[in-house]
Amino acid sequence: MRRAVLLMCDGLSREWISPERTPNIWAMKQSGLWCADHRAVFPSVTRASAAAVATGYTPGNHGLHGNRMCFLVDGKLEVRDAGLPDFRDHMRRATGRTLHVPTMAERLNGDCVAFSNVSPGAAYFLDPDHHGWVYHRAGCFGPGGEPITGDDALTVPSDPDGDAVMVERFCGEVLEERRPKLAICWQCSPDKTGHTEPLLGPVHTAAMAAADRHVAQVFAKVQELRAAGDDVLFLVGSDHGMESIGPRVHVGERLVAAGLKDALDSGDVAVACQGTSALIYVAPGYESRIDGLRAYLKDADWAASVFEGDGLKTLGARPDYGLTFAVDTAYVEKDNGHGVTGQRYEAIDGAEGDAAGAFAQHGGIGPRETAPFLVVDDGSGSGRERAETSSLPNIAPTILGYLGVAAEGLQPSLL
Ligand SMILES: [Zn+2]
């Protein structure tokens, strides 16, 4: 029987993988296909990335713009948080469905079990219409959205200890007993720790080591399954890396102060913050604001690169629902005290301040956040390196191709 297992280590930048920090992932380079130029999608945030992994499309094509996005409601812009439970209802009302393209779970007729320990939105966008099984502490669901409760539910905390419990159960219950065609396990480490601790500091380093130990645990189970006769494709990767944070800017407030947006909650111009990037939407009828916004963004200290029009397409984004500008935030040249150089401005909708490298974020097109890792191990035992660029949307066609399921319209398989 052919099966695929995908294990994600959220937020683990490729440059941090080393024999000392992550010996088990490092060792996998000896047996699998190491994607030496694996890239994140834009924005490099988890919810949009989960949908890119699940479907094989970039955010502009799968339709989930980021961790937050705008919809047009009666001609006004409304910013919605994709992490909230009612987000999928807003998306259905605005677009007629959730994602614009099918997930692997749908293409596999529901023969997919996903365990996720990140945000609810990132978990549910692996299979937003409930073709298969999704387990998350905010609610576990089987096919058709049937709730899974009691001891069968997954209620682990979103931290390295919770990952450990989830991975243990994933190996036994999912890989050994239930044996779906596709099994996905999405750890919150080291991302969750990186959002509260300095990159490469002792706590972040320990979170990377924990995620790496779980890689060895799942790989050992995969080897057992192979020895027992299954053909198993094993993919281990991350969705993005992270960048140290310095100054934090309330982008909406700045636009109001510049006279480019009527009020913080107004529906004329709206900002969907994505950590180290921001999406700026302009409602129909307010196009006269665009020249002023462009001029403001060109001079803003917090904005490094501004994309619009065809520039959005080069990022894999699309100008739906009034999306007009994508802004990547600037750097300040400061070390975080643990050898990580450069601190990024963070786009927020809360109080401004300076984090001074005390924690990290992602979302933009910086060098660390856009360099996740990926190893694809098909059991052949020969390590090799792929120099050509690959990206999160290459994962679904690689899995579907291995399982012999049609993947029309998708990127090529990596195998
Ligand atoms: Zn992530």
Image: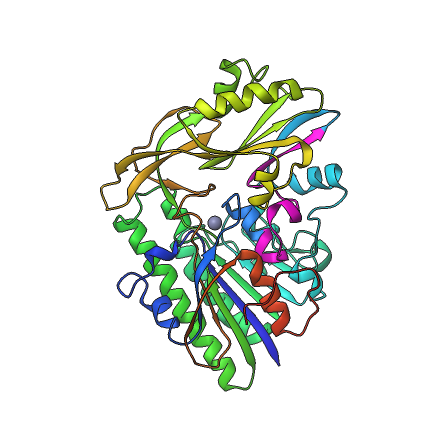
Q: Is residue 41 above or below residue 223?
A: above
Magenta stretch bounds: 51-72
71 part of magenta stretch: yes
Q: Nearer the viewer, residue 88 or 314?
A: 314
Which residue ends up furthest to the front in the rendered image?
310
The C terminus lies in which quarter of the figure? Answer: bottom right
- Looking at the rendering, which quadrant does residue 37 occupy? bottom left
Residue 196 spot, x, y in % from top left: 36, 41
Instruction: Report the number of numbered marks.
Output: 0
Residue 292 spot, x, y in % from top left: 55, 18
Instruction: Report the residue at 33% width, 37% height from top.
Output: 343
Left or right, residue 86 beside residue 368: right
Left or right, residue 290 beside residue 366: right
Residue 290 spot, x, y in % from top left: 60, 22
Q: Nearer the viewer, residue 211 or 176?
A: 211
The N terminus lies in which quarter of the figure? Answer: bottom right
Judge whether residue 291 can be spotted in this image. yes
Q: Nearer the viewer, residue 112 or 383?
A: 383
Judge whether residue 265 can be spotted in this image. no
Instruction: Report the residue at 66% width, 26% height from top.
Output: 77
Residue 201 spot, x, y in % from top left: 26, 48
Q: Is residue 122 above or below residue 332?
A: below
283 part of magenta stretch: no
Q: Tell me which colouring the rendered structure shows.
A: rainbow
Instruction: Report the residue at 54% width, 13% height from top.
Output: 259
Instruction: Report the residue at 59% width, 46% height from top.
Output: 316
